[in-house]
Image: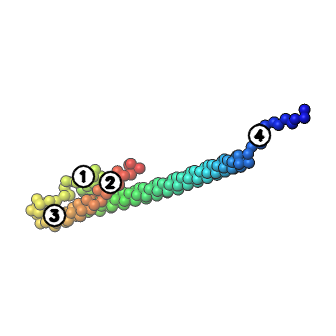
Amino acid sequence: MSEKVVLPKFDIPSESAHPAVKAAKIVGALLGFSLLLLSWATWKHHTAQLAAEQRRDALIAARVAEANAAIEAAKARVAEAAAKEAAAKAEAAAKVEAAKLAAAAKAHPANASNTAVADASGGHHHGAGHHGKGAKGKGKGGDAVAAKGSSSSDEKKSAARGGRDNAAIDKLLAQFK
């Protein structure tokens, strides 16, 4: 046995990986970790952006509601002022009508009841106190009475046109409120 036995050389792989494979695994792990970190940061930024948009929308909605409430309050104040003005106009018109009735009663005491009934009903009166074209030929005082009656009726008609229409409108508006 003196001969040496020469065994062939076999390379048996070791249990450790090649250094290039180790480097590739480390680089891949770092890349995966950085992608996870980037995804988390992007998600946080997105949720913060959505929360900011919701806060902005809530603030806008609150300001719009505030503005609408202010508009409604202003409309209510305007309506209240209009109602007060309508009531004041109606009261003034009633005072004017009462003054006209009192003046007519003093001027024509015999016709006061006819005038009061006609004016209260809102129509024109056609009683004995109204003198038209036919009253001019009735005697000596007929011309003066006719002239006086026609001028006062013209004043009543012009006053009634402006005041009566507004009073009727004011009464209608007051009924709806």
- Which residue lies under the disc numbered 3? 146
- Which residue lies under the disc numbered 1? 123
Q: Secondary structure at mark 2?
A: helix
Q: Secondary structure at mark 4?
A: loop
* 86 on left or right of 110: right
Question: Would you place residue 14 above or below residue 155 in this image?
Answer: above
Q: Give the distance between the C-alpha atoms of the residues marked 1 and 4, in whole angstroms.
A: 131 Å
- Which residue lies under the disc numbered 2? 169
From where the camera sits, is residue 119 visible?
yes
From where the camera sits, is residue 40 visible?
no
Q: Nearer the viewer, residue 54 or 86?
A: 54
Look at the numbered discs 1 and 4 and tell me whether their residues touch, using CB distance below 8 Å. no
| Image location of residue 89, percent across then percent down | 37, 59
Q: Amino acid at mark 4?
A: Asp
> Foreground mark, 1 or 4?
4
> Foreground mark, 1 or 3?
1
Q: Give the distance between the C-alpha atoms of the residues marked 4 and 3, in whole angstroms.
A: 147 Å
First in sequence: mark 4 or mark 3?
A: 4
First in sequence: mark 2 or mark 3?
A: 3
First in sequence: mark 2 or mark 4?
A: 4
Look at the numbered discs 2 and 4 and tell me whether their residues touch, using CB distance below 8 Å. no
First in sequence: mark 1 or mark 3?
A: 1
Residue 11 disc label: 4
At a point 38% along the width and 51% down the height, the residue shown is 174
Q: Amino acid at mark 3?
A: Ala
Look at the numbered discs 2 and 1 and tell me whether their residues touch, using CB distance below 8 Å. no
Q: Give the distance between the C-alpha atoms of the residues marked 1 and 3, in whole angstroms.
A: 21 Å
Look at the numbered discs 4 and 3 and tell me whether their residues touch, using CB distance below 8 Å. no
Q: Nearer the viewer, residue 175 or 72?
A: 72
Q: Amino acid at mark 1?
A: Gly
